[in-house]
Amino acid sequence: MHDLAPQILMLLFLAAILAGFIDSIAGGGGLITIPAMLLAGIPPLESLATNKVQGPFGAASATIAYARRGHVDLKAQLPMAAIAFVGGGIGALIASHVPGHYLGAAIPFLLIGIALFFALKPNLSDVDRAQRMTPALFSVIAVPLVALYDGVFGPGAGSFYMLSFVLLAGFGMLKATAHTKLLNLGSNLGSLAVFAVNGVIFWKLGLMMGVGQLIGAQIGSRLAMHGGAKIIKPLLVLSCIAMAAKLLSDPAHPIRLWLGI
């Protein structure tokens, strides 16, 4: 791992707390942690891989919190989690063979796209709506697609899981968020297994940030269960845009180098 100054480590720890908080409610914690690691000078592939160490801490913490309050049946969801594990592993294999500068170039535009999606979907609520896809079909189409994405890139995977539950399974936002966490844990662990074999993980940094994720997830899941999810939507949009702008303003960003600006 690169030698990082103590103040940088502290900022990354705080970023992990914020990511765990956001991810436990609306998803998208990786939108905070991966750009933060990139800004700290950690290469794109190593940032993605290290993010898979810390991610399970927040996902597991939130999963337990939601299950204890009866918002999700973990046993019934295990088959979906197993599919997510496999999808995440396959995605990580793909990411391991994609040149790092392509990953770094794509992330700001991914941030902007997700911010626009959240901003332009004002009708999302906690009310259940009509189911557009059966659970079986959801398990073999939506789950592996998002899990594959989680392994390849990662940022916003929790948001995509949640929105899939809302738009396809007909869940309200709180119910969708609760069901998202075990799937997020599955795809995180699947991609972590692959990245660990490839040896691109900064373990000490990942574990340190994992503690931050756990703290943030406990705070966020409690807030969500008290009806606070709507507060996170504008925060997530602002965070995405701010991070994208910061990354694109870096003179060393691949897009700026390619364009000669």
Image (cartoon, rainbow, N blue to C red):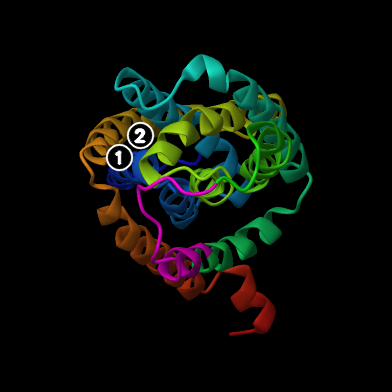
* Residues drawn in magenta: 114-130
The circle drawn on residue 17 is 1
Magenta span dominant secondary structure: loop
Indicate which disc, 1 or 2, sits on the residue closer to the N terminus.
1
From the viewer's perspective, is residue 40 above or below residue 216?
below
Tell me whether circle 1 and circle 2 mark residues in contact (CB < 8 Å): yes
Asked if residue 157 shows in the view, the reply is yes
Is residue 188 shown left or right of residue 151? left
Which residue is located at x 22 percent, y 39 percent?
223
**Figure quadrant of the C terminus:** bottom right
Position of residue 109 measured from the top left corner of the image (x, y, whole percent) = 57, 68
Tag 1: residue type?
Ile
In this rendering, the count of numbered labels is 2
Tag 2: residue type?
Gln
Q: Is residue 115 magenta?
A: yes
Q: Secondary structure at mark 2?
A: helix
Graded by Cα atoms within 10 Å as few (under 14), some (14 to 19) or many (20 or more), the crowding at tag 2 reads many
Position of residue 125 measured from the top left corner of the image (x, y, whole percent) = 36, 53
Residue tagged 2:
213
Position of residue 132 measured from the top left corner of the image (x, y, whole percent) = 62, 48
What's the distance in space between the residues labelled 1 and 2, CA to CA? 5 Å
